[in-house]
């Protein structure tokens, strides 16, 4: 029985305090979702509980192959799912209705911008409440059940609102396949009363998940390859440039084979770093306009033809729109389209197919690579530090460089770390991750948590500015709880230095924290965590020895104190150009 202001009769039954037995879960929506996550490769789900998702969480923990990672807040849970998806190809997170959903949305928008399939699951209202004018808790106090959904519509590629069991199977499978096909996040809301109810659509032994491969239009593919080969085979000194959208279409291997076949030099766009092996003999560095690796920018901009693979040209990657690149000299290869110069353009041609076919048609041309070798002068080394001299950033990164191997991955936070990490030379199989399109500060803390959870064989080395760390610091707690052994370099330069170099003001100075003291308080004697403050090169060398030695199985947090004006030279140049682009006056009317 229920009355008009919402008293609902309580069905008989007790609350579940012991984990569900897998059998109790069979044939239910909760079990179906759990199995599907496992089938597509998810092993860890990042979550924050709330009354709307508790029953669903019971079913996720009943799945022996899933591990639930409780995070301190939803934003970090979302960033963790992002980091996890980078390492494993897919990530998942579970939060509660609206308060959780609206908190995680910034991370989901980030995953959208970086083309990561993140399955964002929200525990939603009781199915009976849809279509009523009841007011629910955790909402803004209006009888509006679609506010959260509407917010997610622009930052996910598919939204499933599961509030009945009849179409739940279809909605969940469509959401998961769309995320994987489009390499974008999806939203799945599951009514809180449905996960545990057996229903005939959920077979006791689910039929395995299946995703049909995407096939290129064969005629379009042939035409695109022929046009591109003709364009490139007549060029005198062509080059290849890898962009960020090389990863989602899984075209990295085909790209290496194309490079091997044609012998052109290979540059990466800043946001494409890590997608081409840097020990490859044709690798010439980062193409980033005026802040390119020396000799790389010159070779790219002076080429008579360049091929960009999955580029995103924005105001940052174009250094305030100052690239000297001409469309008529470019072949632009996007995940499903190829455009030659000012045209023609060929659609429904998939990147890996195109690369493989083009590799067979290109004539070898090493002119640009030979030119690069002829003019190249190796980069300088930083001045040796004096005894007890305050640590310089260039010395810090010299030592970080020497820590890198195939068993590490670098995570670079937005800020001067973008520029300093961009200059690291990545050894074979060393991972590299950052969020350059969205650039939301604080991302790296959650992403480090998620990446380390997915790539247990690698030790993550995260470079995080003090300003960014202040946004998301709490989930150091979860890293310790999960027994992770990442190494965090907290670069304490007293402020938002990247912003100082774009446009300075008093707002760019931040409150100094005792960062090691904070992390020690979070550690609180539970788990393995080691912290230290570093002020000189000697202290740094000693700290790194400890991190790689006695503390090799601990979460290691190094607060590195540096001068507020100690920046990469690239940031200074880039900052002035971005400032100029930002301050363009309105056009005359
Ligand atoms: C969520 C969010 N808010 C604000 C900004 C603007 N912003 C860009 S970089 C930055 C400061 C980063 O400072 P820090 O992490 O200390 O890096 P530094 O440049 O000092 O190394 C800010 C506030 C942002 N990118 N994201
Ligand atoms: C590169 O291509 C140009 C134009 O076809 C040709 O003249 C040149 O010999 C080639 N160079 C090399 C080193 O293959
Ligand atoms: C900062 O925290 C550390 C503990 O990590 C403590 O030893 C130190 O005294 C603190 N510094 C200040 C100024 O309180
Ligand atoms: Mg800073």
Image (cartoon, rainbow, N blue to C red):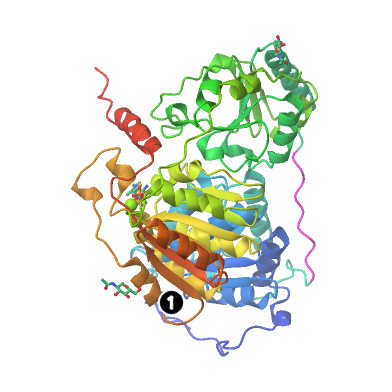
Measuring from the top left, give residue 207's x and y in whole percent: 80, 62
Asked whether residue 451 appears in the rendered view, the answer is no
Q: Residues within 10 Å of mark 1 (few under 14, many from 20)?
A: many
125 lies above or below 355: below
> Within the magenta stretch, is there residue 7?
no
From the viewer's side, name the closer residue of 499 and 296: 296
Report which residue position mark 1 lands on: 523
278 lies above or below 83: above
Query: Residue 275 sits in which quadrant?
Result: top right
From the viewer's perspective, tell me whether residue 466 is left or right of residue 434.
Answer: left
Q: Please, which residue is most extreme toward the front here?
A: 387
525 lies above or below 575: below
The majority secondary structure of the magenta stretch comes to: loop
Q: Is mark 1 within 8 Å of ligand 3?
A: no
From the viewer's side, name the closer residue of 433 and 14: 433
Residue located at (52% from left, 30% from top): 287
Element marked by disc 1: helix
Residue located at (39% from left, 75% from top): 520
Measuring from the top left, give residue 107's x and y in whole percent: 46, 54
């Amino acid at each position: 029985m229920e009355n008009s202001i919402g008293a609902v009769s309580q069905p008989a039954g007790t609350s579940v305090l012991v984990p569900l037995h897998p059998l109790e879960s069979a044939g239910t929506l909760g079990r179906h979702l759990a199995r599907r996550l496992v089938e597509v490769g998810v092993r860890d789900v990042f979550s924050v509980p709330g009354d709307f998702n508790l029953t669903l969480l019971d079913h996720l923990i009943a799945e022996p192959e899933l591990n639930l990672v409780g995070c301190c807040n939803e934003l970090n849970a979302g960033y963790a799912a992002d980091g996890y998806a980078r390492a494993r190809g897919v990530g998942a997170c579970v939060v509660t209705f609206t308060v959780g959903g609206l908190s995680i949305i910034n991370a989901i928008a980030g995953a959208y911008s970086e083309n990561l399939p993140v399955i964002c699951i929200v525990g939603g209202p009781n199915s009976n409440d849809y279509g009523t004018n009841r007011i629910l808790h955790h909402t803004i106090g209006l009888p509006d059940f679609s506010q959260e959904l509407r917010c997610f519509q622009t930052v996910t590629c598919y939204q499933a609102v599961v509030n009945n069991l009849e179409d739940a199977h279809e909605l969940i499978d469509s959401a998961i396949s769309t995320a994987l096909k489009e390499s974008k996040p999806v939203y799945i809301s599951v009514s809180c009363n449905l996960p545990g109810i057996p229903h005939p659509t959920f077979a006791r032994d689910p039929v395995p998940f299946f995703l049909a491969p995407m096939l290129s239009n064969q005629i379009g593919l042939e035409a695109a390859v022929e046009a591109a080969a003709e364009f490139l085979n007549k060029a005198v000194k062509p080059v290849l440039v890898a962009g960020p959208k090389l990863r989602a279409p899984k075209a990295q291997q085909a790209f290496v084979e194309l490079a091997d076949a044609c012998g052109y030099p290979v540059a990466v766009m800043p946001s494409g770093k890590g997608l081409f092996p840097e020990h490859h003999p044709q690798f010439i560095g980062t193409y980033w306009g005026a802040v390119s690796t020396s000799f790389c920018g010159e070779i790219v901009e002076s080429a008579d033809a360049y091929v960009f693979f999955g580029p995103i040209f924005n105001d940052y990657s174009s250094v305030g729109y100052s690239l000297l690149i001409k469309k008529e000299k470019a072949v632009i290869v996007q995940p499903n389209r190829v455009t030659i110069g000012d045209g023609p353009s060929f659609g429904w041609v998939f990147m890996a197919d195109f690369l493989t076919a083009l590799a067979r048609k290109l004539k070898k041309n090493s002119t640009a690579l030979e030119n690069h070798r002829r003019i190249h002068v190796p980069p300088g080394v930083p001045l040796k530090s004096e005894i007890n001299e305050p640590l310089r950033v260039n010395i810090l990164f010299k030592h970080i460089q020497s820590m890198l191997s195939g068993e590490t991955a670098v995570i670079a936070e937005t800020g001067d770390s973008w520029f300093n990490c961009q200059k690291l030379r990545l050894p074979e199989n060393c991972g590299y991750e950052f969020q350059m399109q969205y650039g939301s500060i604080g991302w790296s803390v959650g992403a480090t948590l998620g990446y380390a959870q997915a790539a247990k064989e690698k030790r993550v080395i995260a470079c995080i500015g003090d300003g960014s760390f202040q946004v998301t610091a709490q989930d150091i707690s979860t890293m310790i709880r999960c027994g992770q052994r990442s190494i965090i370099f907290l670069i304490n330069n007293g402020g938002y230095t990247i912003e100082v170099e774009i446009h300075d003001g008093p707002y760019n100075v931040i409150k100094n924290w005792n960062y090691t003291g904070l992390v020690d308080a979070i550690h609180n004697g539970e788990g393995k965590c080691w912290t230290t403050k570093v002020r000189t090169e000697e202290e740094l060398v000693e700290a790194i020895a400890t991190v790689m030695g006695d503390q090799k199985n601990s979460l290691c947090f190094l607060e590195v104190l540096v001068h507020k004006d100690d920046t990469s030279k690239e940031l200074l140049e880039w900052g002035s150009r971005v400032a100029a682009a930002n301050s363009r006056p309105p056009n005359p009317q």
